[in-house]
Image (spheres, rainbow, N blue to C red):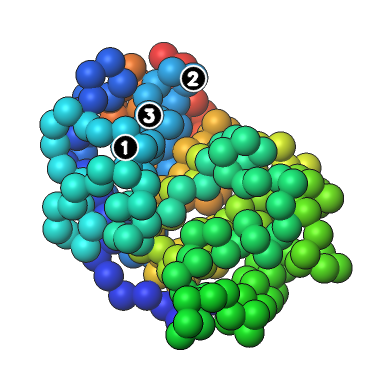
């Protein structure tokens, strides 16, 4: 990855969508990892889908670099530097039958074309090789289909696809679901590295322990609202679990 990115990060102000989430206020600074924990149905994924332009909020503002933006689609989100690693990588995050290379460049075709408008083999190779190396994706040939990879390596490809856009904000929805224990540590290392390079990271966590170890701040979402905020250094996992389950 390139050097540290300098920008104010991202956030939302008084964001609401009927039946899903209500009056959400949050910010994620550049270089910060903020996790949202909560029970199933709390509205966490629904909020993130609006941040990625997949659904429209009824009220409130989405902020990038401190400025309000309007997201009519995920393409608008991408143009504003927002990436979204879906929990369901097999049906929404990746095209499993396509090659590793094709998946990685799928978000940035415009960046890897030559002056005649055709894909540049050199640009494609340079981008894909750089991201495979940066994320230590274990693959013998980037032209192999993603479905030949382990769960951990497939998730790295999913992250690489969004790193290709040079994100300001990267949303990770349950990033270690379907990843074996051995590969979880590698994913955690990638998340820490993203923050170290100045990317604002918003993560949905199903495991409080995961959020506690990975995050600068932990938000609790209940019934569509953010009800509590914790700093891992001054809050125990037991206390956070008590609030989530209470």
Residue 86 horizontal/vertical position (percent):
53, 41
SS under mark 3? helix
Q: Is residue 216 visible?
A: no
Marks 3 & 2, CB-CB < 8 Å contact: no
Which residue shows up at 17% across the image and 59% down it? 66
Q: Are marks 1 and 2 in contact (CB under 8 Å)?
A: no
Coordinates of residue 216 in the picture (x, y in percent):
41, 53
State the residue position of label 3.
Answer: 46
Q: How far separated are the C-alphas under marks 3 and 2? A: 11 Å
Whole-Å distance between the Cαs marked 1 and 2? 18 Å
Mark 1 or mark 2: name the one nearer the start of the chain.
2
User: Where residue 47 sits: x, y (%)?
Assistant: 34, 33
Q: Is residue 64 visible?
A: yes
Q: CA distance from mark 1 to mark 3?
A: 7 Å
Q: Residue at x 55, y 31 (%)?
A: 206
Q: Are marks 1 and 3 in contact (CB under 8 Å)?
A: yes
For this orientation, the residue located farthest to the front is: 116
Q: What residue would you read off at disc 1?
A: 50
Task: Nearest to the eye among marks 3 and 2: give it.
Answer: 3
Q: Nearer the viewer, residue 114 or 122?
A: 114
Q: Quadrant of the C terminus?
A: top left
- Which is nearer the N-term, disc 3 or disc 2? 2
- Secondary structure beneath disc 2? loop
**Callout 2: few (<14), some (14-19), or many (20+) C-alpha neighbours within 10 Å?**
few
Residue designated by label 2: 40
Q: Quadrant of residue 157?
A: bottom right
Residue located 57% across and 64% down the image = 105
Element type where label 1 sits in the image:
helix
């Amino acid at each position: 990855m390139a050097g540290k990115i300098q920008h104010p990060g991202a956030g939302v102000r008084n964001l609401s969508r009927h039946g899903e989430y209500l009056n959400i206020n949050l910010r994620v600074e550049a270089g910060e990892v903020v996790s949202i924990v909560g029970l199933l149905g709390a509205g966490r994924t629904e909020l993130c889908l609006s941040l990625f332009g997949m659904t429209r909020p009824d009220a409130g503002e989405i902020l990038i670099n401190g400025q309000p933006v309007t997201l009519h689609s995920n393409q608008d989100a991408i143009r504003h530097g927002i990436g979204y690693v879906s929990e369901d990588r097999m049906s929404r995050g990746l095209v499993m039958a396509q090659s590793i290379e094709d998946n990685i460049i799928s978000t940035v075709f415009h960046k890897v074309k030559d002056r005649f408008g055709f894909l540049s083999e050199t640009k494609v190779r340079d981008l894909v090789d750089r991201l495979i190396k940066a994320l230590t994706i274990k693959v013998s040939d980037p032209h192999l289909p993603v479905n030949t990879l382990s769960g951990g390596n497939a998730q790295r490809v999913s992250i690489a696809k969004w790193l290709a856009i040079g994100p300001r904000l990267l949303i990770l929805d349950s990033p270690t679901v379907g990843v074996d224990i051995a590969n979880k540590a590698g994913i955690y290392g990638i998340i820490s590295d993203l923050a170290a390079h100045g990317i604002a990271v918003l993560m949905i966590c199903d495991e409080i322990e995961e959020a506690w170890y990975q995050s600068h701040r932990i938000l609790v979402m209940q019934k569509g609202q953010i009800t509590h905020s914790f700093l891992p250094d001054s809050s125990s996992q037991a206390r956070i679990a008590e609030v989530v389950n209470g």
